[in-house]
Every structure is written in structure tokens, then in C-alpha cells.
Amino acid sequence: MQCHHYDAGRCRSCTLLDVAYPVQVADKERHVRGLLEPFAPDAAWLPPVTSAEGGFRNKAKMVVTGTVEEPVIGIVGALPQGYDRVGHRGPTGVDLTDCPLYPPTLQDAFGPLAELVTRARLQPYDLTPSRGRVTPRDAAGRGELKHLIVTVSPAGALMVRLVLRSQEPVARLRKHLPWLQTALPNLAVLSVNLQPEHKAVLEGEREIVLTERETLPMTLPVRPGGLTLHLRPQSFFQTNTDVAAALYRQAAQWIDDVAPASLWDLYCGVGGFALTCAAPGRAVTGIEISAEAVASAQVTRAELEATDGGPAAMAGVRFAAGDATAFALGCDPADVPELVIVNPPRRGIGPALADWLESSSARWVLYSSCNADTLARDLERMPSLRPAKVRLLDMFPQTRHYEVLTLLERH
Ligand SMILES: C[S@@+](CC[C@H](N)C(=O)[O-])C[C@H]1O[C@@H](n2cnc3c(N)ncnc32)[C@H](O)[C@@H]1O
């Protein structure tokens, strides 16, 4: 894929841009085989699921630099020659609004959003590291707007989040919201995230939703009639919508092949695996640390229940908020399901849950991992659970990252 920012040396986030796409996928396949084959002597390896090379990212996380009159939405680039970061106020921003990883609908949102910055007088935050103590007066002089996080649904609807230092601009944003809704008719959700601290974290804990709608509907072609997941501002969602749909479909197919009567979906997020894999007569329990993601999953469950065939498929489905490991370790042995889905963050499931799964009565574990190194480390602790099927899904083209799905069977 060609990218003029990469060619000019302005952005090097896509570390594999010089590598032809089929070679990227072959290298990833080699990497995952090298890590998993010691645990998977008899596994069936399915051909990798590939992605579009560009336009596949449903979410942009942008830094805002520049000025109120001329905001720059993108990344913080290298400083011009002759400046060092200490002596120079205001880091150099690189405009990445036409990054080819974003689909056109997402790219097109940045023009009106830049205009919103000017209209609502949202001064871009100065990220320059401060020398010595930051007084409240210094902090006020540093500006307000830190990041813009924009997510696009498959139908082209947008969720826009403005990460601000304080609530000070919220009234102005409310005032300009009707203008933004006219300029961006596909805007579904606008929210402010408060991140008061002067450090390089993307977002804070507090979210103020300014639109009537609080969720972005993400409809995936994974069930008859589609599955509409309701994404809230702080909920996790896989960044490549098409590959996420392929992931849920593959999971449902392998699960239907072994037809468990009961399953858990640990680290369930807004319910993608659980709700795709639900079937009449199957008990499904989704566990997730984020209460707001669980609330979204429950909304989708209720909506599916009201559709044709829904009552039977959804009868056994429930979601609860909690820590995945604590839930498993605290459950009654009689309640252990036949199959457990795990889709943890990059750190993997960790020793306590791996040891519990190893000694549990679950016959299958379906492990979806975005980090094959931690997957391999977890497999080491589960020698009785061996990969029967493995499939790489290239969720993150142009980078070394990928998703891998494996069905483990007890031996
Ligand atoms: C890789 S995401 C997967 C989400 C979901 N399975 C999906 O397909 O969108 C990992 C999820 O684990 C959740 N999580 C993180 N730590 C957790 C924990 N200790 N217990 C339960 N869920 C946790 C995160 O909030 C996030 O939603």
C-alpha cells in the first residue's frame, strides 16, 4: 500500500508498509506457527483470514496540536531541525486526517471536526513537558483539547469523543452541537472525556455524553438478520470491523461443530462472541470487567429476544460484570460449562485462570488472542488442552500484530 506520509518520513506507525501484503501475512503465519506448533502437534491450520490493505480501521485516535484557528489533527511528529523539545513550546503536529488506514467516512469527518475546534474555541493542549512544578495558572495556559477519538460504524454513523483537560469548554460545545449535527449528519454520539493530568495517557475515566444517543450501533453480518452491538464511548471494540465479523463467524462455526450445551464468554466486551454463538438450548454466560459494556450486551440480548427465533436462542443468555478469573475461581464446580471462550487483553489470561482451566471439567476452550506470545505462555500452563484448530485473522495489516483463534480440546 502507498502512503505519502510514510514516504515523506512524517509517520512511521505502519512498520510493515514496505512489505508486500501477501508477504506480511506469510510472515505472521510463520510467526504464529513457530510459537504454537510445540503445543499443537495435531492441529488443523486453516488458511489465514486476510483484510483489506487500507480503509479497514474503524477507529482513529488523534492528537490535536496547532492553534484554535488552525488545529492540526494527527500525531505529534519530530520537531523542526534546530529545536529541542525543552526549548520549544508547542510540539509539531502532523496532519493525518487522510491516513489511508481510515475509510472515507472517517476521513471526511475531520474537516467539520477541525471547524468545531475553531467555532467552540477549543485551544489545543500543549504537550511540551514542563520544567519544574506546573502551577494551576500554567495549566490553564496550556490549552484544553488533547485528543479526538472517532469511531465509524459499518453503516457510516460516527461516535466522536473529545478528550479535554477540564469541563471548561463543555457549555460552548453544547452551544455548537446543533451546527455540528448539520455539518456531520451521520454523527450519532458526541462525548467529552476528561483527562486532567499532564501525562501521555489517551483518556480519563469520566465521560460526559452531549448527544441524546449514548451508543453507536455496530451491525455485523454474523447472525441471520444481523447482530447489532451497542458501543458506548469507553467500551472496547475490535478495530477492524470486517475481520471482527469473520472472527465471530469462525468462532460460531467451530462451536456449532462441537455443539456444547453450555459456554462462558470470558472478557466478553459488548457481547460479540456470546451473542453470535448463542443457540436454542445452549446456556451462555458472558463476563466482562466493564459494567457499561455489560449493559450494552444486555440491550442487544433483549433486542434479539424480540426478533424471529430470538426467544429460543436468547433464553439461556446472561451477562454479568466482574473479573474473569475471580468469576471462574469462585464458581460452583457443578456450574462449569462444557466450553469456555476467552478473549483477553494483550497480557493474556494469566497463570491463575490458565491453571483453573487446566484442572477444570471444561472440555473445550476457544481462545481468541491478539498477542500470540502471551497465548503461548498460557498454553504452557494448560498441557491437557491442546489446539485442535488454529486460524490467523489479520486484524492489523501493515503492522506485526494479528489475531489468532484456536479451539483447544481436552486430552
Ligand atoms: C480484547 S477485548 C475483547 C472484547 C470482546 N470479546 C470483543 O470481541 O469485543 C478484552 C476485554 O476484556 C475486558 N477485561 C479486561 N480485564 C478484564 C478482567 N480482569 N476480567 C474481565 N474482563 C476484562 C476489557 O474491558 C475488554 O472488553
Image: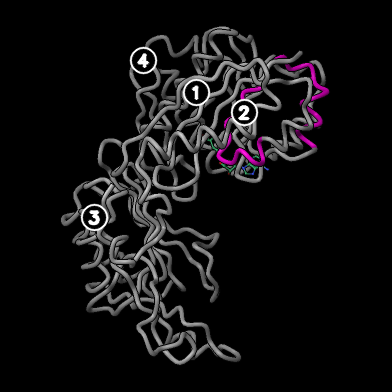
- Bin the neighbour count of mark 1 within 10 Å (Cα to Cα): few under 14, some 14-19, many 20 and up: many
* Precedes in sequence: disc 1 or disc 2: 1
Separation of marks 2 and 3 at Cα, in angstroms: 36 Å
First reached walking from the N terminus: tag 4 or tag 1: 4
Q: Nearer the viewer, residue 30 or 250?
A: 30
Q: Residue at x 39, y 47 (%)?
A: 398
Label 1 within 8 A of ligand 1 by Cβ: no
Q: Marks 3 and 4: CB-CB under 8 Å?
A: no
Q: Nearer the viewer, residue 201 or 118?
A: 201
Mark 2 packing: few (<14 Cα in 10 Å), some, or many (20+)?
Answer: many
Q: Residue 53: in sight, yes or no?
A: yes
Q: Identify the coloring.
A: one colour
Which residue lies under the disc numbered 4? 224
Mark 1 or mark 3, which has the lower sequence index? 3
Query: Which residue bears the numbered disc 1?
Result: 275
Alpha carbon distance from label 3 to label 4? 31 Å
Q: Which residue is mark 3?
A: 109
Q: 53 or 206, which lies in front?
A: 53
In this picture, is 250 found above or below 107?
above
The segment highlighted magenta reads: 352-375
- The question of residue 372 being in magenta is answered with yes
For mark 2, give the secondary structure: strand
Whether the residues at callouts 1 and 2 have beta carbons within 8 Å, the answer is: no
